[in-house]
Amino acid sequence: MQLNTKTVVFVRFLVFLLFCNDLLVDMAVVESVVIIHDAKSSWDVDPPFPGPLIRAMFADRVRIRITNMLRDQSTAIHFHDLHMINNPRADDTAHITQCPIHPYEKFIYELNITQTGIFWYHSHNAQQYADGLIGPIILDHDILEQRYDYGSHDYVIILQDCTWKDNCGHEQPVQCIPLRASFFGSCKSEAHPIDEFLCSPEKSIRLRLINAASGIPFRFWIDQHNLTIVARDSIEIASISMSLVHIAFGQRLDLIVDCNQDLSVNYTIFVASRNSYQPSLNNIGATPPINKSHSIEHDKLDSNDLFFEYKYLKPFKPRVAPAAIRRITLASEVRWNNRTGIDALEEWSVNGITFEPPNEPLLLANVFDGTFKHCVAYQRAGRVNNKHVTHIQHLEYGQTYEVLMINYDSQLHPWHLHGYSVEFTAVGKIPNLKSAKCNQTQKDVRPFNYNTVLLPLNSTLPVLSVGDSFTVPSESYVVFRFTANNPGPWFLHCHMEWHIWPGMALVFSVERNGRYDGLIQSPTTSFSTCGRRTKISYQSSRLLLSNSHKTEL
């Protein structure tokens, strides 16, 4: 059987064939070399995008040597959902766990592999990952390899949106993928060769799906085939078969596809944004774009179900979240300095706080006096009744917390928590409020008494789903619990690149009595301070990675 891949929206559609044994190093120490280049000096007809696969196994030690060859910007590589247990320095969130890697500097990551499944790496500085500084990670010997018979038919698919303009609307986007020499000129919509997935009759294939988008949640389906979802964020779920799946920003899904259809036919794989986007039409004589649609029936679920991941991605075995000692309420919103939309200042905030990166990495608190006062950014007033400061929620090591995420905004927000997988226990819409004016119904944005909706903190709760990357739909709330057993400063942020850096983020700092002493080893002398350096402006970047062991730079 042959599955013929195709995209139906403007996305990067990236495929890795995982039976290439030269990328698999079966040894205790796996070493890789990462060289980050500037796109302006390295672009060619076969551009270095994305970074090739990093592959290791459970209990391996991975050493990754970084050289930043960007001419005018810093960078940092984050290994998405690798928990870095007792090793938060390797989480590499610029300004949180370490200083950025400046141009022409070198850095070595030491990773102790304690998980299995599909992961990915990406820049965590400015908007570099939206421009392609990404790559996949496979950590072998997960339970799915034993449970499903797919042989060598194992594939990674990375989905990513493309943005190369800094304005919105006013023109139709070019309908082609900028992965070839035609990027700076005219191009054809079929410029990228069609990828083919081969599958033996009555056998199965495994698709490891990664949503690396910076602005779009995706829908994914295969013509005349059911998709069996078997894992979310590298955690096995109770398998569920459906004709279409949703995948949120930053999220990973493992799919098993049975090859049981007519072998004489090629079947198309479709990818589409969950929402449709159109340019603005604000000039006289503009012609509205025409949308062409096909009639597609999807059973078992609403194709626009906002709570897809909580309804369908259930734990493999029923599980219960433990009682919590405190509820942390985090309400996110955008604030504008005017309502005209013309030269408006947009600032994102959580609880009225616009996140400001610390002056020094929070892990350096051990080096100073054990507190954070030398690290956090100085507080300053915002211009839309908000404040700018390093937003830190201090958590006591070993305790369980309940987090209530409220989204007052009219758009969804994809969130990611570093260092943990969490247990989701409740989701819902913000209640409606009847308005006396014209009997209108609007969302109730007043402080809402969630104690009347949520069960007491001392209750154990059934778990809806488990993961590290999740969506808080528009005008909705999501509740999760987790035990703070991984010490360090862990970033919680919106994974929409245009929201994280304008301030939609905070830090969960897991401490003992307000300090890291005795929980985390103090940094070495090579762990330099950042100083109050000016943020380096963002430029286009690409990543080159070669898997090899014992390679010196």
Image (cartoon, helix red, strand yellow):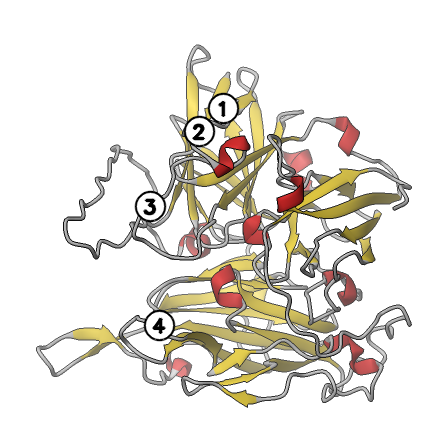
Lower sequence index among marks 1 and 2:
2
* Comparing labels 3 and 2, the label whose residue is closer to the camera: 2
Residue 55 in the image, given as x and y percentages of width and height: 75, 40
Please determine whether, in this image, residue 500 is positioned above or below residue 170: below
Closer to us: 510 or 504:
504
Kindly identify which numbered label has been placed on residue 20: none
Discs 1, 2 touching: Cβ within 8 Å: yes
Residue 426 shown left or right of residue 30 in the figure? left
> Callout 1: few (<14), some (14-19), or many (20+) C-alpha neighbours within 10 Å?
few
Q: Nearer the viewer, residue 90 or 74?
A: 74
Q: Give the percent coordinates (x, y) of residue 305.
A: 34, 52
Q: Which mark is residue 6?
A: 2
First in residue order: circle 1 vs circle 4: 1
Q: Are marks 3 and 2 in contact (CB under 8 Å)?
A: no
- Residue 139 placement, left or right of 537: right
Disc 1 versus disc 4: nearer the observer = 4
Of the two numbered discs 3 and 1 in the rendering, the one whose residue sits closer to the viewer: 1
Q: Pointer 3: what residue?
A: 303
Sooner in the amino-acid sequence: mark 2 or mark 4: 2
The residue at which mark 1 appears reads as 194
Look at label 1 and name its amino acid.
Ile
- The earlier-in-sequence mark between 4 and 3 is 3
- Tell me if I can see residue 139 in this picture: no
Secondary structure of residue under mark 3: loop
Give amino acid for label 2.
Lys
Quarter of the rendering containing residue 383? bottom left
Measure the alpha-carbon separation of dots 1 and 4. 43 Å
Q: Residue at x 68, y 57 (%)?
A: 78
What is the crowding at mark 3: few (fewer than 14 residues within 10 Å), some, or many (at least 20)?
A: some
